[in-house]
Image: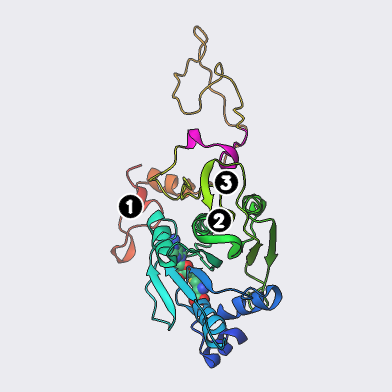
Amino acid sequence: MGRSSKDKRDVYYRLAKEEGWRARSAFKLLQINEDYSLFNGVNKVVDLCAAPGSWSQVLAKKLIEEKEKPDNVKIVAVDLQAMAPIPGVIQIQGDITKKSTAQKIISHFEGDYADLVVCDGAPDVTGLHDIDEYIQAQLLLAALNITTHCLKKGGNFVAKIFRGKDVTLLYSQLKIFFPLVSIFKPRSSRNSSIEAFVVCQNYCPPEGMYHHQYDHQYGQLYKCYIPNMSNPLLDHQYDVDFNNLEGPNRIIVPFLACGDLSGFDSDRTYPLELEPGKEYVYHPPTQSPIHPPYEEACKLRKSDQLSKPSDGGHLRDIGAANDDR
Ligand code: SAM
């Protein structure tokens, strides 16, 4: 007998139902907390990409329900999708790639900063690994951008990451802001999934970027990193002049153009006679296609059968859609 989709659901799915979590993902955050004690001394948290809300449920449980005197707790949850209310959790329906969302989050902290930012964001996977990894990386960078707006110095950031082939680039971007970056794979995260969680500790924006800010704690002006939402791949309403960035905000990667201007430009169309006075000579391809997909269509066209109704009045499958080519 075939397995029904219900049989395939794992133990964490069932446990989540039993314990009242909105999603099995709750166990991922709980298990990360077991190893990293994420919630010690934490009162203010931002939960990015929070719907349906199991991470927010965990946060509400740990910061409000399990504390005798929950003091000054603030949990702000953000998602593109609306989610059912959770007592003690402020909800924002918004896109984490937008500056306006960062501003809404900050407005809830009333000049204060978050102790912890978590992000379980995932795009709708396409199954094309390169694309999925790329979109996931962009979502993580958007979460990092938001984090630089609202996380206190020394705070922590936890986010879902796909360990694809270019993941080291992400690690080095995270290391600019956090001296401690580690990857965690909770038991509740399926082995077959490339998902893992990056745990970034002790937020420390780079020094030497040059915006003077008054430090109330030390009563002096200091130079600090300016948070911005200028990931050019995500937000086309740039709020930063990229050519005038300085210090650690200005990251330059080498650009190597191969071939000089005397070579052919692959985007141009050239006449057959490439060298003046030298006649064009046809060269056959060194390897002809083996059974090309259009082979049958060519045969059908030769016998004038292409796109003619066959039995049952249906068009012949092959080439029917491309008849005019
Ligand atoms: N942590 C959640 C929980 O425990 O219930 C599950 C999060 S779910 C795996 C991923 C979420 O990311 C989805 O709800 C999706 O709407 C959200 N998401 C994806 N892209 C987003 C974006 N650009 N802005 C806000 N949320 C986004």
Q: Are marks 3 and 1 in contact (CB under 8 Å)?
A: no
Residue 307: mark: 1
301 magenta-colored = no
Of discs 2 and 3, which sits in the foreground?
3
Q: Read off the residue under disc 2.
A: 137
- Disc with the residue nearer the chain's start (1 vs 2): 2
Q: Which residues are magenta?
A: 242-254
251 magenta-colored = yes
In the image, what residue type sits under mark 2?
Ala
- Name the side, left or right, on which 87 lies relative to 186: left
Q: CA distance from mark 2 to mark 3?
A: 32 Å
Res 306 seen here: no
Against 144, is 87 above or below? below
Residue at the outermost bottom position:
18
> Element at badge 3?
strand
Q: Position of residue 293 (x, y in %)?
A: 50, 49
Q: Read off the residue under disc 3.
A: 222
Against 317, is 207 above or below? above
**Relative depth, front residue between 218 and 80:** 218
Residue lying at 57% horizontally and 54% vertically, measured from the top left: 130
**Relative depth, front residue between 125 and 96:** 96
Q: Quadrant of residue 185?
A: bottom right
- Disc with the residue nearer the chain's start (3 vs 1): 3
**Relative depth, front residue between 186 and 2:** 186
In the image, what residue type sits under mark 3?
Tyr
Q: CA distance from mark 3 to mark 1?
A: 75 Å
Residue lying at 53% horizontally and 77% vertically, measured from the top left: 55
> Element at badge 2?
helix
Q: Position of residue 302 (x, y in %)?
A: 39, 43
**Relative depth, front residue between 237 and 36:** 36
